[in-house]
Amino acid sequence: MANSLWNTRGISYQGCAAQVLFFVFFFGSEYSILTIMAYDRYVAICQPLHYGSLLGSRACAQMAAAAWGAGFLNAVMETANTFSLPLCQGNAMDQFFCEIPHILKLSCSSSHLREIGLIVLIVALGFGCFIFIVVSYVQVFRAVLRMPSEQSRHKAFSTCLPHLAVVSLMVSTAIFAYLKPPSISSPSLDLVVAVLYSVVPPAVNPVIYSMRNQELKDALRKVFGYMLIQH
């Protein structure tokens, strides 16, 4: 945002490190919270009588603290490992923000294998969270489909689908950004993919979740109805 306002394309070394730290921190924390939300949906639908004991205020606070703590620890390790490498391939990146894969391209040190190993570990943990989300929703959908009331099924699906939409968008774009084969990599494609996984999910989060709000739906209907009448 600052670069856009001052029409510049530069960032300081310390600013780049801070950007990596905050980006990895918020991205990892959001993904952890999305995993917790999948567990919340599972307990609410599959074990509703135990919801108060399993997900009380204390349990929610502990899980939230664990999500933010794990995200911060991950961000510190990623940032420290990335910026401990000597950058000997120049200081220009074909990206609109400091992204770890592009920073690694600027290093000619063999120790970047340590960073790749850390990324592989984090990807494995992320895949474990994804499997947990999938298994949770398999159980949720099995329970929902057994509900005798169509209204109950509709209410359960309306609770789960916004969360699934955010998870699908976030995971699919991040996987493509970090695991796409080098043969199809290009500066323009990397730019588009980076926007998809870093900008789009946070931007559509409020829209997706607020679509459950009946007052918002009624307001949108009035706006579109007024526009149609005017035309």
Image: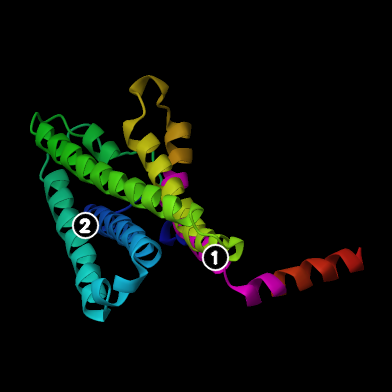
Identity of the residue furthest to the top in this view: 183
- Determine if the magenta segment contains residue 81: no
Q: Can see residue 8?
A: no
In this rendering, which labeled residue sits more in front, label 2 or label 1?
1
Q: Indicate whether 157 appears above or below 113.
A: below
**Image quadrant of residue 36?**
bottom left
How far apart, in angstroms, are the residues tagged by discs 2 and 1?
A: 53 Å
Q: Position of residue 172 (x, y in %)?
A: 42, 40
Q: Earlier in the sequence, mark 2 or mark 1?
A: 2
Q: Out of 51 and 36, give the one closest to the viewer.
A: 51
Three-letter amino acid code at disc 1? Answer: Ser
Q: Which residue is mark 1?
A: 152
Left or right? Give the position of 98 relative to 73: right
Q: Main secondary structure of the magenta part?
A: helix
**Image quadrant of residue 120?**
top left
Q: Residues within 10 Å of mark 1 (few under 14, many from 20)?
A: few
Q: Which residues are magenta?
A: 194-218
Left or right? Give the position of 110 relative to 144: left
Q: Quadrant of the C terminus?
A: bottom right
The secondary structure type at the circle numbered 1 is: helix
**Can you tell which mark lies on residue 163?**
none
Q: Out of 111 and 44, give the one closest to the viewer.
A: 44
Three-letter amino acid code at disc 2? Answer: Gln
- Determine if the magenta segment contains residue 199: yes
Q: Which residue is mark 2?
A: 14
Q: Indicate whether 10 appears above or below 120.
A: below
Residue drawn at (78%, 73%), measured in percent from left and top?
A: 222
Residue drawn at (22%, 54%), measured in percent from left and top?
A: 17
Colour scheme in use: rainbow
Residue drawn at (34%, 23%), measured in percent from left and top?
A: 182
